[in-house]
Amino acid sequence: MEKKMSILVVDDEPIVCDSCKKILTEKGFTVETALNGEEALKTFKKGDFDIVIVDLKMPGIDGMEVLRSVKKSKPEVDVLMITGYGTIPSAVEAMKIGAADYVPKPFTPKELGQIISQVVEKRSKLVAEKAPKKGAILLDVFKKPPKVVYHPERVWVKDIKIEEALDENFLNQVRSTPGGERVMDCMQCGTCSGSCPLSYRMDYTPREINAMVRAGLRDEVLSSNSIWMCSSCYLCTVRCPRQIKITDIMYVLKNLAMKDKRFLKKAKSPLLSRYFVDIVNRYGRNHELELTLRFFLRTNPKAILKHSFMGLRLFLRKRFTLFPKRIKNINQLRTMVRKAEALGGLR
Amino acid sequence: MKYTYYPGCSLEVSSRSYNDSALAVSELLGVELVELEDWNCCGATVYLSYEELISFSLCARNLALAEKYDRDLVVPCSSCYTSLMKTASYIQENADLRDKINQALQAAGLEYKGKVNIKHLLEVYIKDIGLDAIKSKVKRELKGLKVAPYYGCQIVRPLHGFDDPENPTSLDRLIEALGATPVYFPNKTSCCGSSLIATNEELAFRMQKDLLLCAAGNDAEVIITVCPLCHMALDAYQKGVGKMYGFNFKIPVLHFTQLMGLALEIPSRKLGIKTGLVPLNKALTAYI
């Protein structure tokens, strides 16, 4: 059953209050009364009223003040003014401020009933208009929430101060690297994100990363897990309708992140890369046993036991060698690496 | 036909059976593979993540060494293949990169003019030797053997051009030439997650689970790979993947050269057939 509508009647004449209460209670409303403005405002504050009927002329706080106060705190409440014969112009004034209607004194129970019915009808129409229509909830999903909150997986609701975040040099670094030239061609179609086997676990999908690179959101991009999640399968690259080499852009971003410790706190991949680089620079070739041992010793010593069992089985099947093999001309390779380092890399 | 052969670190260190079978099969098909002297690591995805210029230079050193001979460079590992191909094409396309790589090479007394033609081993068999020639050498047709052709990502992507990047068929046709049956395998180019196996095992296992389920669901009796890393992921970790997801996978995984070797009647010991961690099943032992 619907909740009964609640009405507050305010008049300095007790007889008016009582008769109104009698008429309206019979019509199914919950009614409370107050004999002056002060009492009215107190009662109004405590209760949950839909309609207020107030006499315009009262000693102390008059009807006009009650109207103003009610409309200020709860604009959705309808206020009806009770007016004597000589106060019609004031009633018109009250209507301008926001009163719903006025009831000229003296009134018969029938007249009061009619005016109240009109107000009730108008209210129910308004309520129906405000209620969510079919499909309205769906539309809401696409609207930016009115309150801006931190929501790491959705960059558009993040509270970003654009002037601080913009780093134009970031975009140029990406564009000047092989594969990154076409990042500006991205039309945000999302084919990359839809194709990526790992986008579901990324802080930002590849499509978002492209947009963020263009917006210069350097720190957000380089500290995200997205760049280390990329498994380099190139599906995004071959499907991109604008031929943007997204996998290569991920490598550019990994390189940039590698240069700043701030970005490497959570990811394990940079550590693996470091050990790999160290081994290759030493022998000229990779040695999986040493790489695995060093990496797991640092990140997850328990895993060594598990892997050593597998390693033993592989070794018994003559699948791998225990000792690394150094290339003959390792000095030539090291000279080359040093020179490339001295050139400052690609950026 | 004579080629320069770049085996890559994995074939030397952890996938020797791929190397052995590749050499044995090539010899029988008249493909002479001469190992590139003093080759170095291609850098793979790991060095490339650290610093691209050095990683490209590592590949360029191999290309410079290979350029001394007037032969195509053959690579059996998909990861090395992509690294070398990428370096070669970026040296052509990007003047700034070319200039820096040349400076690094010159410091080491090397030079690369950009003339080396790089091919994957599968490409050599399919395009240079041809399926008809292979078929004529088959001594023991692998009749009825149901094979899942797994290409992985980096042999067909990014656009290397020798097969379709999403639905390649060369391995399927090779299987048919050997008398076996390629099963329907829609995940044939899905990533095996091998580059994440050390850093994020859970994610890698999830990707491998999808592959193994697809192969098992289509009744594959064996999966064949064209990359040592894919082989390692699907063979060595198969038990662990099954354990994590509650499946009892038992699908043997072979290098494609091992399967070819069986059809060409090369002794199984020479092919290292029994070196997989997943035990062979009846369907395969019938051909050994």
Image: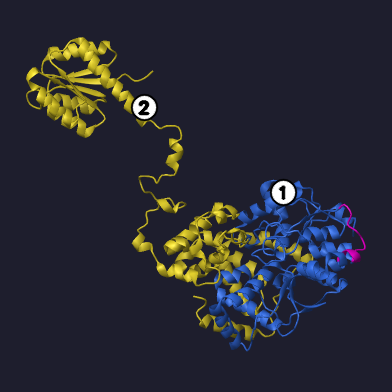
Q: Is residue A189 magenta?
A: no
Q: Colour of chain A?
A: yellow
Q: Which mark is residue A169?
A: none
Q: Position of residue B237 (x, y in %)?
A: 70, 57
Q: Which residue is mark 2?
A: A128
Using the rendered image of the protein, determine whether residue B231 is visible from the camera's viewpoint.
yes
Q: Which residue is painted at 26% across and 24% down in the image?
A: A50
The vertical placement of A26 against B15, above or below, is above
Numbered tag placed on residue B213 in the rendering = 1
- Discs 2 and 1 lie in a common subunit: no
Considering depth in this image, is B19 or A131 the residue closer to the camera?
A131
What color is chain B drawn in?
blue
Chain for mark 1?
B
User: Is the residue marked by circle 1 packed among few (<14), some (14-19), or many (20+) residues within 10 Å?
Assistant: some
Residue positioned 52% across, 77% down in the render? A345
Give whichever of B241, B131 is nearer the camera.
B131
Of badges 2 and 1, the one in the foreground is 2
Location of the N terminus of chain A by quadrant is: top left
